């Protein structure tokens, strides 16, 4: 204990001990126990070991020692002490002599150290520690002149020791200036080619100690982190622009990422799916399967809103464990692999559509479920019509063009007692005047000369036992009106050129968009026929008077059109929807359907955009949302008709088609607005 110069107690902090040691130049410190009797000595290496074990500089030494108890006495053989120290988790310090024998050891709670032998060269001990340190260490005097550098710092700088010693530290390492001046705690400092972080501790009376930590490891980690971040970003971007609907789930089936087309297709918001269980939110994807089988698979064809899709289920496997799964919903490629395929598909769907129509000619295709509505009056109307269907009376369906009068006629027939009979449609406006009679009543064999020798069955004959739907009844000539009236009264007729009375059991449903009462007044429609037809009258309101039907009809019609056109439209962009909701729809549901068909053909997939809508619709958009007055509606209607006629160079058939109204409907409007 001869070399002991200073004494410290269990209350002394590590910082104080360190400063004392530094000031007293590599000496031992005596430690007093609680009774202030000499208890042991603290060597510098021991102190450093304790600090590197993680004790705070401000912590009292005694408290640290109490936490780190080892039962080693002076009689413990050095080998055993070494073993204990090595295996100890408590960071006990050991002091060795030059020959490697144990010189001192940390023992009881209230004692710091007992010397087992002579402590000869503490400077050497420190040098040993510094030699093996991973930190570059530099000591300076008060003038910042370098007095010591450790081998690690020599290695880092690549400079010879003598070229470093006695130089001002901040000349060799200019980055240290800010730390020496106390502006910063740390400095990024290049030692040779090594990037380091340097810290400076000052020991007021003696100088400074500078520690250099190699940051290349940290930088490597940072660059790996950067790579991972970049990968994540690429993945997110790929998802953002992915053509398919993609969803990724983690090992517990929680949804971690989802692509916008996926959300579009299933009409979901991101927060409705993210971090939720895929098995609960999207059970129809059946992603759970791949967690069990660990093999990728493709689903059968599925369908949503008229859009066909298939799901590719892909497990993410690491080792022999499934750590996640990907659900890839392909709905666009199905239709868009190539232009050819698309065209083929359209042709096919059109062909099958017409084939279906052909098969269903003379049979009613629609029921009440096909008349889509959210409007109270329409629902009441459907109920009354369904009641009327049960009887035998003639039904007159009235309403503007394209409001769904024909649909009502189909549904009435289908829910009537004669639904197994035929449903025969005659468009009174479409048949040339001179053929109308033979169309209605047929003709006997040989009634005409020439090719049509064989005779023809008329619509009344055809509809026997079923329903005859007389569309556009207001457009029938007065002479035919008389003949029709007779059949309605007597339930029998003569074929053209025939002499035999034909008896029929036919229910008549008539429809018109004309103002029959006015026509009766004008003498262009027979009053007696009017009363015969007008037994039960159903008035289908125009779309502008049941605006709540518009969104519902848009949704249902898009589903239907996706099937017919082979498109994958998921909805309308907000502004396009707004425009649709504010338009007055003079052509009613037919016009709505035509505008959607055009928009869907232009957009092909995703959502219908504003620019996919026709100009005449966009031009009539009110600047501000305001209640539509009748004159405003009429004005819009007039503008639309003018534009259509203009665009079609006066061709009324084409203009009517473009407007989505019937030819007779257009004629009526032309008359109404006195257009020529
Ligand atoms: N409520 C509805 N639900 C579903 N589709 C409808 C509805 N109303 C009309 N439609 C559709 O709109 C189009 C026009 O309907 P429909 O032919 O029945 O009208 P209309 O009043 O008979 O027309 P017009 O007077 O020009 O003959 C059809 O394609 C029809 O399927």
Image (spheres, helix red, strand yellow):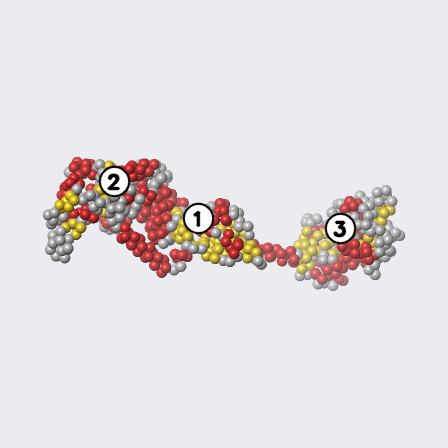
Number of residues whose C-alpha sits closer than 10 Å to that of mark 3, classed few (under 14), some (14–19) or many (20 or more): some
User: Circle 2 — which element?
Assistant: strand
Q: Which residue was labeled with disc 3? A: 90
On screen, residue 351 versus residue 515, left or right, reads right
User: Circle 3 — which element?
Assistant: loop
Q: Which residue was labeled with disc 2? A: 397
On screen, residue 446 versus residue 537, left or right, reads left
Residue 232 quadrant: bottom right
Of mark 2 and mark 3, the one earlier in the sequence is 3
Of mark 2 and mark 1, the one earlier in the sequence is 1
Whether label 2 touches label 1, CB < 8 Å: no
Q: Position of residue 574 (x, y in %)?
A: 40, 45
Note whether residue 432 is visible. Answer: no
**What residue is at 84 percent from the left and 43 percent from the top?**
34
Mark 2 to mark 1 CA distance (whole Å): 39 Å
Of mark 1 and mark 3, the one earlier in the sequence is 3
**What residue is at 85 percent from the left and 47 percent from the top?**
39
Mark 1 to mark 3 CA distance (whole Å): 59 Å
**What residue is at 65 percent from the left and 58 percent from the top?**
216
The residue at label 2 has a CB less than 8 Å from ligand 1: yes
Q: Position of residue 309 (x, y in %)?
A: 42, 53
Number of residues whose C-alpha sits closer than 10 Å to that of mark 2, classed few (under 14), some (14–19) or many (20 or more): many
Q: Which residue was labeled with disc 1? A: 266
Where does the C terminus fall, quadrant-wise? top left
Q: Position of residue 98 (x, y in %)?
A: 83, 60
Which circle, 2 or 3, is nearer the viewer? 2
Mark 2 to mark 3 CA distance (whole Å): 96 Å
User: Circle 1 — which element?
Assistant: loop
**What residue is at 20 percent from the left and 42 percent from the top?**
474
Number of residues whose C-alpha sits closer than 10 Å to that of mark 1, classed few (under 14), some (14–19) or many (20 or more): few
Note whether residue 333 is visible. Answer: yes
């Amino acid at each position: 204990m001869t070399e002991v110069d200073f004494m410290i107690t269990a209350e002394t902090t590590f910082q104080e001990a360190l400063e004392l040691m530094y000031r007293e130049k590599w000496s031992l410190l005596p430690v007093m126990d609680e009774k202030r009797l000499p208890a042991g000595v603290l060597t510098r290496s021991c102190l450093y070991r304790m600090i590197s074990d993680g004790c705070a500089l401000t912590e009292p030494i005694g408290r640290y020692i109490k936490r780190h108890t080892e039962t080693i006495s002076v009689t413990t053989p050095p080998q055993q002490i070494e073993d204990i120290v090595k295996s100890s988790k408590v960071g006990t310090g050991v002091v060795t002599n030059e020959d490697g024998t144990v010189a001192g050891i940390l023992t009881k709670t209230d004692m710091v150290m007992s010397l087992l032998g002579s402590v000869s060269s503490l400077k050497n001990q420190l040098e040993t520690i510094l030699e093996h340190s991973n930190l570059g260490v530099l000591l300076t005097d008060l003038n910042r002149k370098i007095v010591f550098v450790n081998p690690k710092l020599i290695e880092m700088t690549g400079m010879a020791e003598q070229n470093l010693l006695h130089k001002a530290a901040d000349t060799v390492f200019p980055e240290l200036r800010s730390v020496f001046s106390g502006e910063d705690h740390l400095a990024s400092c290049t030692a040779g080619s090594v990037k380091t972080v340097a810290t400076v501790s000052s020991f007021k009376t003696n100088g400074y100690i500078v520690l250099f930590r190699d940051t290349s490891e940290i930088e490597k980690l940072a660059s790996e982190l950067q790579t991972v971040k970049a990968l994540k970003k690429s993945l997110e971007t790929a998802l953002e622009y992915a053509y398919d609907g993609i969803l990724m789930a983690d090992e517990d089936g929680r949804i971690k990422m989802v692509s916008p087309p996926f959300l579009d297709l299933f009409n979901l918001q991101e927060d409705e799916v993210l971090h939720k269980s895929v098995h609960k939110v999207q059970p129809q994807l059946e992603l759970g399967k791949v967690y069990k089988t660990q093999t990728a698979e493709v689903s059968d064809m599925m369908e949503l809103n008229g859009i066909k899709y298939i799901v590719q289920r892909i497990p993410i496997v690491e080792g022999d464990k499934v750590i996640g799964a990907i659900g890839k919903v392909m709905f666009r490629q199905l239709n868009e692999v190539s232009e050819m395929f698309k065209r083929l598909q359209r042709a096919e769907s059109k062909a099958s559509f017409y084939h279906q129509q052909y098969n269903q000619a003379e049979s009613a295709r629609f029921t009440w479920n096909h008349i889509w509505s959210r409007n109270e009056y329409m629902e009441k109307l459907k109920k009354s019509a369904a009641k009327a269907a049960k009887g035998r009376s003639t039904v007159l369906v009235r309403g503007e063009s394209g409001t769904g009068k024909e649909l009502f006629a189909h549904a009435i027939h289908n829910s009537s007692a004669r639904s197994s009979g035929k449903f025969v449609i005659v468009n009174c406006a479409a048949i040339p005047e001179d053929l109308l009679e033979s169309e209605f009543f047929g003709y006997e064999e040989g009634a005409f000369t020439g090719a049509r020798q064989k005779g023809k069955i008329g619509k009344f004959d055809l509809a026997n036992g079923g329903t005859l739907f007389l569309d556009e009844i207001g457009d029938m000539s007065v002479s035919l009106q008389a003949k029709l009236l007779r059949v309605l009264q007597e339930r029998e007729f003569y074929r053209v050129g025939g002499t035999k009375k034909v008896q029929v059991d036919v229910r008549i449903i008539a429809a018109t968009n004309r103002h029959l009462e006015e026509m009766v007044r004008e003498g262009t429609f027979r009053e007696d026929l009017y009363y015969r037809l007008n037994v039960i009258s159903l008035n289908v309101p125009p779309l502008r008077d049941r605006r709540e039907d518009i969104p519902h009809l848009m949704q249902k019609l898009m589903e239907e059109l996706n099937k017919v056109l082979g498109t994958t439209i998921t909805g309308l962009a907000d502004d396009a929807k707004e425009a649709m909701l504010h338009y007055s729809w003079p052509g009613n549901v037919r016009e709505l359907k035509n505008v959607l068909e055009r928009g869907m053909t232009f957009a092909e997939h995703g959502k219908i955009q504003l620019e996919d809508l026709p100009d005449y619709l966009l031009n009539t958009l009110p600047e501000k949302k305001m209640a539509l007055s009748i004159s405003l509606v009429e004005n819009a209607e007039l503008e639309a008709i003018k534009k259509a006629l203009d665009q079609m160079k006066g061709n009324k058939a084409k203009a009517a088609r473009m407007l989505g109204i019937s030819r007779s409907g257009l004629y009526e409007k032309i008359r109404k607005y006195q257009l020529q």
